[in-house]
Image (spheres, rainbow, N blue to C red):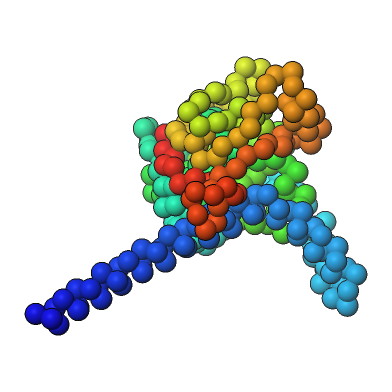
Amino acid sequence: GTGSSILSALQDLFWLSKSKVEKQLQIISVLQWVLTFLIMGVACTLILMYILCTDCWVIAALYLAWLVFDWNTPKKGGRRSQWVRNWTIWRYFRDYFPIRLVKTHNLLTTRNYIFGYHPHGIMGLGAFCNFSTEATGVGQKFPGIRPYLATLAGNFRMPILRDYLMSGGICPVNRDSIDYILSKNGSGNAIIIVVGGAAESLNCTPGKNSVTLRHRKGFVKLALRHGADLVPVYSFGENEVYEQVIFEEGSWGRWVQKKFQKHIGFAPCIFHGRGLFSSNSWGLLPYSKPITTV
């Protein structure tokens, strides 16, 4: 009757609202990470400098003193937090694309591993979600294996950002850090190295799979030195989530990018995704395209 029709309509409205809320939470979770990737380090540094000039300078001074004391922690395996890795926000992050992790082989906990990850993409979204959070179940799929996602060492010189990254099990991609994890941290460690790095990000564009591997064999030498096993990892769809302006070899744009890459460690890319309020507008949010990491 009429009552049943009204109840049915209310139920439809409830589920519609729930779906919209979940979509907005997914957008917020991804926006949070994009802003972290792009500006958190610089923003935290500026805020800390500002606090030093206010009446609350003692707080900033105490943090800086602790920072000096804690400076080498990133090189010694960091300070991961299972609580942070299991935040609900990462599940919304996963579902936005969605991101999926596919296991094709068991890994022994008595061994150490170096994962050679491709492609870099603009922000390495698949690498972060799969190995710096538990959103895709890396801990359940590979029980007893501790993943360490390796990224630019410069990120660990930024106040606050360094602690945030370490909480997810992220470490500097330098020899000291990798040597420590593979030789002084027991077994069952897996370091994820995005082999192509900044150079590979310059060629990422939808519909194209181009990897940078030639002349990048340092991770193989490290594996041989420490007796670690190499594990190939590929994220299908990583290049689909952003559009990028590709500068041809020999152009002024590519020259600028390579100079930044050589002297700073990262290459500035001109890219865009979708807008915050509409998928038809340009913005910093990635497109919601599936990423499958194998």
Given residues 86 and 190, the one toward you in this image is 86
**Residue found farthest to the bottom:** 3
Residue 271, given in percent of the width and then of the height, sits at 62, 39
Residue displayed at 68% across by 49% down = 38
Given residues 70 and 152, the one toward you in this image is 152
Q: Quadrant of the C terminus?
A: top left
Q: Judge left or right: residue 3 versus residue 268.
A: left
Q: Quadrant of residue 64?
A: bottom right
Q: Quadrant of residue 153?
A: top right
Residue displayed at 52% across by 58% down = 277
Residue 87, given in percent of the width and then of the height, sits at 50, 61
Q: Quadrant of residue 212?
A: top right
Residue 166, given in percent of the width and then of the height, sits at 64, 52
**Residue found farthest to the right:** 53
Residue 273 appears anywhere in the view = yes
In this view, 20 is above or below 154: below
Residue displayed at 73% across by 48% down = 156
Q: Quadrant of the N terminus?
A: bottom left
Residue 135 appears anywhere in the view = no
Residue 223, given in percent of the width and then of the height, sits at 59, 26
Q: Judge left or right: residue 78 versus residue 60.
A: left
Q: Judge left or right: residue 228 versus residue 257.
A: left
In this view, 144 is above or below 79: above
Residue displayed at 81% across by 60% down = 46
Q: Total number of numbered labels? A: 0
